[in-house]
Image (cartoon, rainbow, N blue to C red):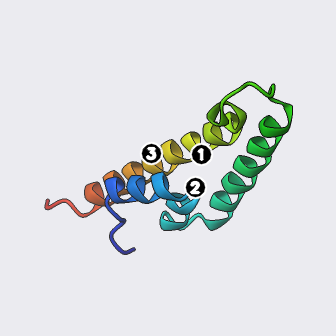
Amino acid sequence: MKQPLNPRLVLAVALILPGMGQVLNRQPVRGLVFVCFAVLLGAFTLKTAAPDVSFVGKVSGGLFVWAMAMLDAYKTARIRRAVWDHGNAPR
């Protein structure tokens, strides 16, 4: 098994593009699911929000899923890194 990526790098990429953190963690299907739900919930809140709501409020559903995707990618990267470090520690 090759060394997992730095969790901070995974978080930085996930901050820029939703779902890409999962792709870097070798979970492309999970990343695609996060992107689909972010788009769907963003579109849903965009259509159902009141006209006087700000743009951020109108796409808040998608932003919420994006935030959860970032958290998931970072947590997975940290766990994988810790497991790899533990398995390769000098004895």
Residue that sits furthest to the bottom in the current view: 2
**Whole-percent x, y for residue 69 in the image:** 57, 47
Label drawn at residue 66: 1
**Which residue is found at the position 79% from the left and 45% from the top?**
43
Mark closer to the chain start, 1 or 3: 1
Q: Please determine whether, in this image, residue 58 is positioned above or below residue 85.
A: above
| Quadrant placement of the C terminus | bottom left
**Which residue is at the front of the view, 4 or 91?**
4
**Which residue is found at the position 39% from the left and 74% from the top?**
1
Mark closer to the chain start, 2 or 3: 2
Q: Which residue is mark 3?
A: 75
**Whole-percent x, y for residue 76 in the image:** 47, 50
* Mark 2 secondary-structure assignment: loop
The disc labelled 3 sits on which kind of residue?
Lys
Q: Residues within 10 Å of mark 3 (few under 14, many from 20)?
A: some
Q: Which residue is mark 2?
A: 18
Q: Are marks 2 and 1 in contact (CB under 8 Å)?
A: yes
* Mark 1 secondary-structure assignment: helix
Q: Are marks 1 and 3 in contact (CB under 8 Å)?
A: no
The disc labelled 2 sits on which kind of residue?
Pro
**Which residue is at the front of the view, 40 or 32?**
40
